[in-house]
Image (cartoon, helix red, strand yellow):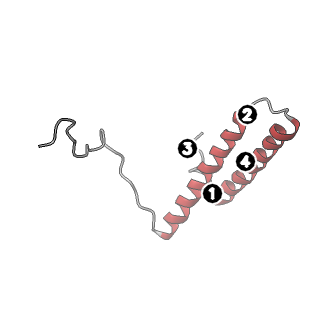
Amino acid sequence: MKDDFKSLNLEDLKKEIQTSSEKVREARFQFGVTRSLENTKLIRNHKKRIARALTVVREKELSAKGELKQIAPKAGSAPKAAQTSKGKKK
């Protein structure tokens, strides 16, 4: 589900954002006014879908301009900062 946005074009991504926004609006209305929303996690899930779609749209815009920086994945753990001693200072 997370990776299906990268295969869509900009038109489809914008439609996905629009439909998810409408579903969030409807769910908020059901939850706030009529108190008939059974699954309150629905709002959170659609907000996450909107965020993922907006991220992919931004990535595509930046890659079209040539401004997108590729970040290499981390190999192992992050380097440790200078450790401070917890003992007495000299």
**Above-or-below relation of 74 to 40:** below
Most foreground residue, 34 or 1: 34
**Above-or-below relation of 16 to 64:** above
Farthest-out residue, left: 90
**Label 2 residue SS:** loop
Label placed on residue 20? 4
Residue at the spot of label 1 = 9
Residue at the spot of label 3 = 3
Q: Which is in the foreground here, disc 4 or disc 2?
A: 2
Who comes first in sequence, dot 1 or dot 4? Answer: 1
CA gap, disc 2 and disc 1 = 30 Å
Q: Quadrant of the N terminus?
A: top right
Farthest-out residue, top: 38
The structure residue drawn at horizontal position 45% and vertical position 63%, both measured from the top left corner, is 68
Q: x%, y% of residue 77?
A: 30, 39
Q: Residues within 10 Å of mark 1 (few under 14, many from 20)?
A: few
Who comes first in sequence, dot 4 or dot 2? Answer: 4
Q: Please, what is the three-letter code of the amino acid marked with disc 1?
A: Asn
Residue at the spot of label 2 = 40
Who comes first in sequence, dot 2 or dot 1? Answer: 1
